[in-house]
C-alpha cells in the first residue's frame, strides 16, 4: 500500500508544476514567416505587393536588400501609417524576420493586408538574391558646403 501511495505521489508532482493552458506564453508573433519561394512568388506581381523594410539604413547597406521597398524603421511604423498604401499586399523585411514579424503584426492590427515577414539574410542563405546597395560617394560640393557651414 505504501508503494502505491508513493507511486501516485510521484506521478502527481509533475502535474502540480505544469502550467495551465491559459498561463502558457503566447507566441511572439502572429505573422507568417515567408520562405524564399513564397516571397519569390509574390515578387512576380510587383504591382500588387509592397516590401516594407524595417531595418536601419546601415543594415540595408551592409547586408543588402530588395530592389524596391519602402524604408520605415520598426519604431516609426505607427507614425508612418499614412505613407503605407492599404491597396497593396504587404511584406515586412528585417534581417532574420524578428522585427519584420512585429511590424507585420502592427500593420495587420491596423487593417493592412499582410502576406507575412521575411528575413533578408535568411532569404539570401536560402538561395535568394539581394541587391547590394552602395551609398553615393560624397561630392566635393557637398563637403565644401559642409565646411562653409562649419567655418563661416
Image: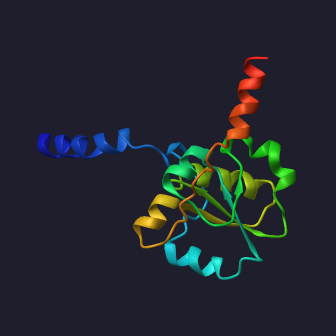
Give residue 80's position: percent from left, percent from top: 81, 47
Q: Quadrant of the C terminus?
A: top right
Give residue 97's position: percent from left, percent from top: 53, 56
Q: Is residue 16 above or below residue 26?
A: above
Q: Residue at x 74, y 55 (%)?
A: 107
Q: Is residue 149 above or below residue 118?
A: above
Q: Is residue 121 left or right of residue 106?
A: left
- In the picture as drawn, the residue positioned furthest to the top comes out as 152
Q: Is residue 26 visible?
A: no
Q: Is residue 88 left or right of residue 100?
A: right
Colour logic: rainbow
Q: Is residue 109 left or right of residue 9?
A: right
Q: Is residue 116 above or below residue 80?
A: below
Q: Quadrant of residue 19?
A: top left
Q: Residue at x 48, y 72 (%)?
A: 128
Q: Is residue 118 left or right of residue 80?
A: left
Amino acid at each position: 500500500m505504501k508503494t502505491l501511495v508513493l507511486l501516485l505521489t510521484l506521478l502527481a508532482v509533475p502535474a502540480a508544476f505544469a502550467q495551465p493552458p491559459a498561463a502558457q506564453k503566447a507566441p511572439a508573433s502572429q505573422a507568417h514567416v515567408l520562405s524564399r519561394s513564397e516571397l519569390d512568388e509574390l515578387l512576380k506581381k510587383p504591382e500588387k505587393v509592397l516590401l516594407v523594410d524595417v531595418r536601419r539604413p546601415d543594415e540595408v547597406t551592409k547586408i543588402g536588400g530588395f530592389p524596391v521597398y519602402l524604408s520605415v524603421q520598426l519604431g516609426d511604423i505607427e507614425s508612418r501609417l499614412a505613407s503605407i498604401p492599404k491597396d497593396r499586399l504587404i511584406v515586412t523585411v528585417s534581417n532574420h524576420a524578428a522585427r519584420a514579424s512585429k511590424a507585420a503584426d502592427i500593420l495587420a492590427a491596423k487593417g493592412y493586408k499582410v502576406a507575412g515577414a521575411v528575413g533578408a539574410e535568411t532569404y539570401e542563405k536560402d538561395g535568394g538574391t539581394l541587391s547590394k546597395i552602395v551609398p553615393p560617394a560624397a561630392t566635393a560640393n557637398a563637403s565644401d558646403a559642409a565646411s562653409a557651414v562649419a567655418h563661416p
